[in-house]
Amino acid sequence: MNSVALSSVHSHAALITALETHPAGIVFSGGQWQSTGAVSSDNNDAVITVYAPALTAWQLEKVSDALTPVATLSGFRLHALSGKFHETVVTGSIKTADVPGLKPLLEKLAESLRVDIVVQAARPSLSAPGLLVMDMDSTIIQIECIDEIAKLAGLGDKVAAVTAKAMRGELAFSESLISRVACLKGVPVSQLAQIRDSIPLMPGVVPLVSVLKDHGWKIAIASGGFTYFADHVKERLGLDAAFSNTLKTDGDVLAGEVTGEIVDAEVKARTVESLASEWQIPMSQTVAMGDGANDLVMMAKAALGVACHAKPLVREKADTTIRFSGLHGMLYLLAD
């Protein structure tokens, strides 16, 4: 291997120049950057992806130094989508006997360097049709709709506390939902429009949907939230399906109950499987994304489970984690 000249390890431009000059890959070894003949194509290797705005060689050095005692990095190259969403994305292959065992180290590295770092044993492909099923509240949108309804009813703190416990996995979701919805009895249905009309979308969701649709993917919502909002988000983003809970009404006010089957963790998981079957998409091409404990079962069902800005328990158990990027970061985790 030949040494790679970097004018400054703290310069983003220097890293890009080095990567573009050596498209097969560069590796940090023996205290310096070197070119590598090619990134390993061994099917038994895992894939490492590192991304952040204005990523530098110094940050990659820190990643390499931390992983060297427990894994073998074959080199980094630019991801095909690097720069498309104003983030530098590098990927390479990594030999390790225990991908899940790297999670605590990756979590520590990501927090200290403020970069997203993912190691995957297998990846769905962007080049073939696939299925993405996403939670809605605090995943596709930046709010918990039930908490917003409760605020209008003057019960915001009470309901939000129960929501937080449910998302951390401290309460059974169905039980917590029934309890929280009961608090909403008597809230005018007209107030729901105030929330619907000002829903803040999560950064990155629009390009995520656009790119996936361009590649023939199907996209659905599986939410423990409510149809009033999920159907609106589905229409707004042009998604293919939405499954959520229906609030029962009593005239022009909420009855404090939900009707029909509650969309809980098990229902979300069944949704991934049933939609994949309906649309003839192999399970190897399925992705589930969410932020709460009630999303873990569907994440386990899908080929790739992505925790997005999630609670610690969810980051620990999910296949991969988006910590700092917008939702479009999921695209970097697909084979290019």
Image (cartoon, rainbow, N blue to C red):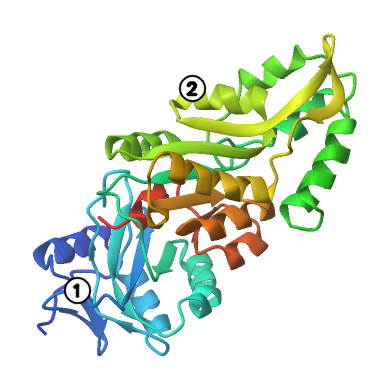
**Residue 51, percent from left and from top:** 36, 59
The residue identified by callout 2 is 236
Q: Residue at x 26, y 52 (%)?
A: 82
Q: Residue at x 42, y 85 (%)?
A: 97
Can residue 310 be seen in the rendering of this structure?
no
Quadrant of residue 91 in the image? bottom left
Please determine whether, in this image, residue 85 is positioned above or below residue 18: above
- Nearer-the-camera pick, 278 or 49: 278
Q: Quadrant of residue 188?
A: top right
Residue 230 location (% of width, % of height) = 60, 28
Disc number for residue 117: none
Q: Which residue does the image show at 45% across and 77% down from the upper left?
A: 99
Whole-percent x, y for residue 197 in the image: 61, 17
The residue sitting at 31% across, 78% down in the picture is 44
Task: Classify the position of the N terminus by image quarter.
Answer: bottom left
> Within 10 Å of the Cα at label 2, are there few (<14), some (14-19), or many (20+) other Cα atoms?
few
Q: Quadrant of residue 243?
A: top right
- In this orientation, which residue lies closer to the viewer: 329 or 255? 255
Give the alpha-carbon distance from disc 2 to disc 1, as whole Å: 41 Å
What's the mark number on residue 39?
Answer: 1
Q: Position of residue 323 (x, y in %)?
A: 51, 56
On the rendered structure, is 91 left or right of 167? Answer: left
Mark closest to the chain's N terminus, 2 or 1: 1
Crowding around mark 1 (Cα neighbors within 10 Å: few <14, some 14 to 19, many 20+) is many
Is 56 above or below relative to 134? below
Amino acid tagged 1: Val
Q: Nearer the viewer, residue 210 or 266?
A: 266
Which amino acid type corresponds to the residue marked 2 in the rendered image?
Arg
Give the structural element (helix, strand or loop) at label 1.
Answer: loop
